[in-house]
Image: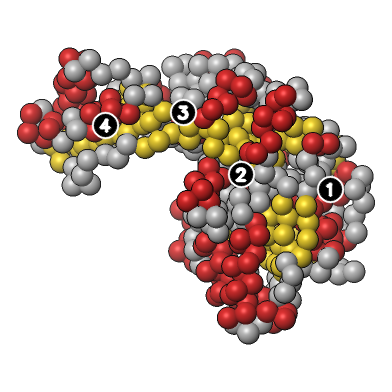
C-alpha cells in the first residue's frame, strides 16, 4: 500500500484552462489525474450530439488531451479518472483506445468504463412504479415537464470507480458521477478503506471538494490578499496528498504561481455549501464543521479531524428539460450622464416592445458599470461614470417574440439616446433554455455497470 | 463606531439553484465572535433587501472561523433560467462585505480596529 497518494485536479469545470492537466502531469510526481468535464447542462448537449451521431455524446476535449498526455501517464504510472464519457461512455472509451493504438501504447492502456447512470430511457417505467422524481427545490412531480426532458442521469459515487481500478484500469471513464467521487474512488482503491469507514470516506470526499474546482483553492478567485497572489498566469492547479489515516495535504507543484494557504482553502471549502453539517454524497455524509486546517510549509495546508456519517438511501439525479428561450442585448453609453442615457434607452426599448405586443415571461434590465453586480447596495450611480453598459435580457416560450426583440437592439444606435457604442458584436442570438431538474432516486433502482474495454 | 465587514472578513459565494450561498471568513480568529454576534441572518436579510426574495439561513463553522449564509430565491430562478449577469451569485460575496456593523469604541480598540 502506498504511504501517500497524490491526486491532481486537471479541470475545475467544463471549459477550464486547456493546458492545466498537461502541466499537472509534467510539473512533478502525481499518482492520479482527475478531470471534471460535465457542467449541469452538458448532458443535454451531449444527448443531442448522440441523436445526430450514435458515435458521439462524450467530451471530445478529453480524447485530444489523452493524445497529448497518455504516453507520459503510462511512463510514470499516472492513472486518469474523468467523467468525460457523458452519455456515451463506450464511445469515449473506444476513441481513447484508438488514440492509444495510434501512439503504439495500447498494450499498456487499460480503459475502465463506468456506466449505468443514464436513466433517460427509463423515465416512464420509473414514474409508473411510483418513483415521482419530484423537483428538490419546488416539490413538483416530473410529470409536469415529461415531454420536454432532454437528459436524465443519476450521480454515481466512488464505488464504481473503485471497481474499475480494481479491474486494473489506468484510465477510468465515467458518465455522470459526483466530482468528489472522482477523488475519493482512487483513495479507497489505494488505501482499502471500508465502505462504512465514514470518517475516512468523509475525509476523501472533502479532499475532492477542495480540489474539484481546480485553481479556485490555489489562488484563483481568491479574495484574501488578492493583489499579492503571485504569478496567476502560471497558476498551479491543486494536488491532494492523502494518507491512509484520512488526513491530507493540499498543495501544488513547485515553481507554479498562485498560492495554497489557509485562507485560499477556506474560501473553496465555503463554496457552494449548503448545511455544513450535512454534505450528502452517494458514499457518505460529510461534516464540514469537523474540518481542521494547519499550515504545513509554503503552499501546503494540512487538513485533518474530519468526521462523517452513513450515506443515505438515495442518489441525486440531474434531469435537463427545455424551458423556452432567451436573448441578451447590450449597448454602451458614455459620459456625461451615461447612466441617465442608458436608462432612457431602456425606457424607449421597453415601450417599443410593448407597442409591438410582444409578450415575455421576464424582461430584466441591468446597468453594467453602475449596479449590475450589487443592485441597490451599489448606491446611486455617479453622473461622472465614463460609460455604462445597458444590458437587457428577455425570456419566454414564444421564440418569435424573442427573435423580434433581438432586432430591436441595433436600431437604438440611430434612434435612441446619444454617445452610444458597443454594438459591433452583431445581433444577439436566440438561445434555447435547457433548465435543470434536481431529484432523488432510491439507490436500489440504479445498477452501475463497470468493465474494462476489451483490446 | 461602524465597521465595514471588509475590515473583518473575506468571503466566497456560489450558487445552488436559485439560492446563493455566501461564506464569510474572519480575517483573524479574534474577529469571529464579533461576526457571530453581529452578522445575524435577520441583518443579512435586511442588507440584501431587494436582491434576495426568500429566507436567509445562517450556519456556524467555528472550526473555520466562518459563517455560511444561504440566500434563497436570489438568483432570478438560477442556472440557465436566470437572466442576471451574476446568475451564479459570484459577486454576492463582496455584496455582503459592504455591510457595516456597530461596535463599541472599547471593543474596536481591543481588536485593533480603531
Residue B61 is situated, as x and y percent measured from the top left of the image, at 73, 33
Which of the two labelled residues, at mark 1 and mark 4, occupies the earlier sequence position?
A: 1
- Asked which secondary structure carries label 1, the reply is helix
Residue A34 is situated, as x and y percent measured from the top left of the image, at 66, 60
- Asked which secondary structure carries label 3, the reply is strand
* Residue, disc 4: A403
What separation in Å lies between label 3 and label 4 (alpha carbons)? 16 Å
Which of the two labelled residues, at mark 3 and mark 4, occupies the earlier sequence position?
A: 3
Q: Mark 1 lies on which chain?
A: A
* Residue, disc 3: A323
What separation in Å lies between label 3 and label 2 (alpha carbons)? 33 Å
Quadrant housing the N terminus of chain A: bottom right
Q: In this view, does A217 lie above or below A438?
A: below
Which of the two labelled residues, at mark 4 and mark 2, occupies the earlier sequence position?
A: 2
* Residue, disc 1: A201
Rendered residue at 73%/79% (across/down): A108
Quadrant housing the C terminus of chain A: bottom right
Q: Which mark lies nearer to you, 1 or 3?
A: 3
Q: Which mark lies nearer to you, 2 or 1?
A: 1
* Residue, disc 2: A267
What separation in Å lies between label 4 and label 2 (alpha carbons)? 41 Å
Residue A398 is situated, as x and y percent measured from the top left of the image, at 34, 24
Which of the two labelled residues, at mark 3 and mark 2, occupies the earlier sequence position?
A: 2
Amino acid at each position: 500500500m502506498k504511504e501517500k497518494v497524490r491526486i491532481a485536479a486537471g479541470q475545475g469545470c467544463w471549459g477550464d484552462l486547456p493546458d492545466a492537466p498537461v502541466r499537472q502531469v509534467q510539473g512533478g510526481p502525481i499518482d492520479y489525474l482527475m478531470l471534471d468535464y460535465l457542467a449541469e447542462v452538458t448532458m443535454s448537449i451531449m444527448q443531442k450530439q448522440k441523436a445526430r451521431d450514435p458515435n458521439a455524446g462524450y467530451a471530445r476535449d478529453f480524447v485530444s488531451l489523452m493524445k497529448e498526455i497518455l504516453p507520459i501517464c503510462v511512463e510514470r504510472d499516472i492513472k486518469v479518472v474523468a467523467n468525460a464519457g457523458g452519455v456515451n461512455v463506450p464511445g469515449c472509451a473506444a476513441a481513447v483506445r484508438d488514440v492509444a493504438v495510434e501512439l503504439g501504447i495500447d498494450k499498456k492502456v487499460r480503459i475502465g468504463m463506468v456506466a449505468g447512470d443514464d436513466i433517460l430511457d427509463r423515465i416512464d417505467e420509473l414514474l409508473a412504479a411510483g418513483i415521482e422524481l419530484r423537483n428538490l427545490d419546488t416539490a413538483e412531480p416530473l410529470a409536469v415537464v415529461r415531454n420536454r426532458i432532454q437528459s436524465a442521469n443519476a450521480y454515481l459515487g466512488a464505488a464504481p470507480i473503485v471497481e474499475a481500478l480494481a479491474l486494473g484500469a489506468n484510465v477510468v471513464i465515467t458518465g455522470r458521477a459526483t466530482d468528489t467521487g472522482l477523488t475519493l474512488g482512487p483513495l479507497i482503491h489505494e488505501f482499502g478503506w471500508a465502505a462504512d469507514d465514514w470518517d475516512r470516506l468523509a475525509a476523501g470526499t472533502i479532499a475532492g471538494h477542495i480540489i474539484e474546482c481546480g485553481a479556485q483553492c490555489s489562488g484563483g478567485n481568491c479574495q484574501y490578499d488578492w493583489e499579492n497572489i503571485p504569478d496567476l498566469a502560471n497558476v498551479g492547479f491543486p494536488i491532494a496528498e492523502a494518507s491512509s489515516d484520512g488526513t491530507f495535504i493540499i498543495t501544488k507543484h513547485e515553481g507554479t504561481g498562485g498560492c495554497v494557504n489557509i485562507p485560499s482553502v477556506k474560501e473553496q471549502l465555503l463554496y457552494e455549501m449548503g448545511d455544513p453539517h450535512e454534505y450528502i454524497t452517494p458514499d457518505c455524509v460529510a461534516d464540514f464543521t469537523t474540518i481542521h486546517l494547519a499550515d504545513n510549509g509554503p503552499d501546503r495546508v494540512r487538513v485533518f479531524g474530519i468526521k462523517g456519517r452513513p450515506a443515505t438511501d438515495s442518489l441525486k439525479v440531474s434531469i435537463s428539460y427545455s424551458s423556452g428561450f432567451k436573448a441578451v442585448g447590450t449597448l454602451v453609453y458614455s459620459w456625461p450622464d451615461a447612466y441617465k442615457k442608458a436608462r432612457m434607452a431602456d425606457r424607449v426599448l421597453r415601450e417599443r416592445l410593448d407597442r409591438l405586443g410582444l409578450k415575455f415571461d421576464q424582461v430584466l434590465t441591468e446597468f453594467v458599470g453602475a449596479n449590475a453586480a450589487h443592485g441597490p447596495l451599489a448606491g446611486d450611480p455617479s453622473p461622472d461614470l465614463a460609460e455604462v453598459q445597458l444590458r437587457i435580457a428577455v425570456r419566454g416560450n414564444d421564440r418569435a417574440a424573442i427573435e423580434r426583440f433581438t432586432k430591436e437592439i441595433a436600431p437604438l444606435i440611430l434612434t435612441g439616446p446619444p454617445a452610444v457604442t458597443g454594438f459591433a458584436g452583431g445581433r444577439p442570438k436566440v438561445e434555447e433554455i435547457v433548465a435543470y431538474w434536481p431529484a432523488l432516486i432510491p439507490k436500489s433502482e440504479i445498477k452501475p455497470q463497470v468493465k474494462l474495454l476489451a483490446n | 463606531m461602524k465597521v465595514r465587514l471588509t475590515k473583518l472578513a473575506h468571503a466566497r459565494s456560489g450558487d445552488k439553484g436559485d439560492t446563493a450561498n455566501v461564506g464569510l471568513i474572519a480575517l483573524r480568529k479574534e474577529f469571529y465572535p464579533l461576526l457571530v454576534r453581529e452578522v445575524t441572518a435577520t441583518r443579512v436579510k435586511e442588507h440584501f433587501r431587494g436582491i434576495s426574495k426568500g429566507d436567509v439561513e445562517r450556519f456556524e463553522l467555528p472550526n473555520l472561523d466562518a459563517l455560511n449564509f444561504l440566500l434563497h430565491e436570489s438568483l432570478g430562478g438560477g442556472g440557465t433560467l436566470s437572466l442576471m449577469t451574476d446568475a451564479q451569485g459570484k459577486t454576492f460575496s463582496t455584496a455582503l462585505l459592504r455591510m457595516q456593523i456597530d461596535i463599541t469604541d472599547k471593543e474596536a480598540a481591543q481588536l485593533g480596529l480603531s
